[in-house]
Amino acid sequence: MLKKVNTEKAPAAIGPYSQAVITGNLLYTSGQIPLDPATGEIIQGDITAQAEQVMKNLGAVLEAAGTTYAHVIKTTCFLADMNDFTAFNKVYEQYFTEKPARSCVAVKQLPKNALVEVELIAAVQVVENS
């Protein structure tokens, strides 16, 4: 059984998908791009600014699911330009301090011409109903 995760503190899905789902004790997020949750628009700025917004969005989804960055198991990172790798890593390492497994690839284009997108898998605590 899947439990959908939704929060207004992160951008609404821009397609037919959920912000995240929980199955068992695992959270799977959809990819987050640097959308401002209030406006639904890409924030202006370089890779550093956009990566910061992506991390804020992921943090909001993690919080809504009852977990934190410390429980992230795996991330997949998509960059529009691999020349942004070093600057992206400087932001990334501030949030993913437990150093989860990761893949990072360059892609031809991201939704709304974003510079970065990140998705993750995290552990969540299952609360049994008594």
Image (spheres, rainbow, N blue to C red):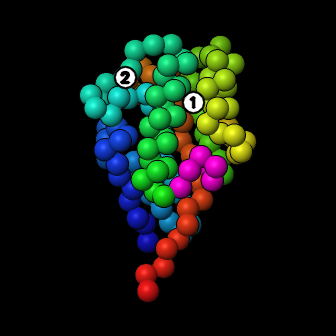
Report the number of discs.
Answer: 2
Q: Secondary structure at mark 2?
A: loop
Distance between the alpha carbons at the discs numbered 2 and 1: 16 Å
Q: Which residue is mark 1?
A: 78
| Nearer to me, 39 or 102 | 39
Q: Secondary structure at mark 1?
A: strand
Residue at point 40% right, 48% down? 19
Q: Is residue 69 magenta?
A: yes
Place of residue 74 in the rendered image (x, y in percent of width and height, measured from the top left): 65, 47
Range shown magenta: 67-72
Residue 121's place in the image compared with 34, above or below, is below
Q: Which residue is outermost to the left?
A: 39
Q: Which residue is mark 2?
A: 42
- Of mark 2 and mark 1, the one earlier in the sequence is 2
Is residue 105 in sight in this rendering? no
Q: Is residue 9 magenta?
A: no
| Nearer to me, 110 or 51 | 51
Left or right position of 26 against 17: right
Residue at point 66% right, 23% down? 90
Mark 2 nearby-residue class (10 Å; few <14, some 14–19, many ≥20): some
Q: Amino acid at mark 2?
A: Ile
Left or right position of 89 against 15: right
Place of residue 128 in the rendered image (x, y in percent of width and height, measured from the top left): 48, 79
Locate the C terminus and report the quarter of the image it occupies: bottom left
Q: Amino acid at mark 1?
A: Phe
Place of residue 37 in the rendered image (x, y in percent of width and height, measured from the top left): 33, 34
